[in-house]
Image (tube, grey):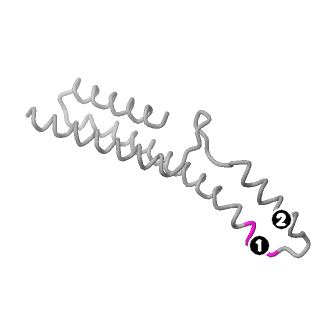
Amino acid sequence: VLQTTIAVALTLSVVDVFRSSHPTALVAPAIGLGGVVQIFLKASTLTDCCERMPSFVNSLSMEQITHRDRMDLVEHISYSRAGFFVFEIRLTSGMVLKALYVLCMAIFALATKVVAGL
């Protein structure tokens, strides 16, 4: 889903550039694409924080709670798989960085095609 969203945004940006003769037509789609990437990076940061929560809770010293209760709480947090989901897929920073890498490759390929065509 993430890669499809970025691919569609990139395709629409390319069509927009080719329809207009001004190179400044790329500025607005680039800002929009940068915003989408930033939103996905923030969402993946939330998922990364949720992954570290069980170890944080386990490290707390709570004298009112028994060891068994704390273990149950940590297991409950671990099994809940909290995080940011996009269409039932957990959004991790690894996924976002891979999609960003593919986006950069596509932009580089597009830029070389445009420069070679000039």
Residue 29: x and y, percent?
Answer: 34, 36
| Residue at 29% over, 40% down | 27
- In the displayed structure, 64 sits above or below 4; it is below
In three-dimensional space, the C-alpha distance between marks 1 and 2, rounded to whole angstroms, equals: 9 Å
The kind of residue on which mark 1 rests is Leu
Query: From the viewer's perspective, is 5 left or right of 23?
Result: right
* Residue marked by disc 1: 60
| Residue at 44% over, 45% down | 37
Instruction: Determine which of the numbered discs, if any, sits on residue 17 in the image.
Output: none
* Residue marked by disc 2: 70
Front residue of 61 and 39: 61
Q: Main secondary structure of the magenta part?
A: helix
Counting residues from the N terminus, which is met first, the one under dot 1 or under dot 2?
A: 1
- Nearer the camera: disc 1 or disc 2: 2
Mark 2 Cα shell of 10 Å, populated few (<14), some (14-19), many (≥20): some
Which quarter of the rendering shows the C terminus?
top left
Quadrant in which residue 24 is drawn: top left
Q: Tags 1 and 2 in contact by the CB under 8 Å rule?
A: yes
Front residue of 96 and 58: 58
Residue 44 colored magenta?
A: no
Q: Which residues are magenta?
A: 57-61
- In the displayed structure, 77 sits above or below 1; it is below
The kind of residue on which mark 2 rests is Arg
Residue 102: x and y, percent?
Answer: 35, 42
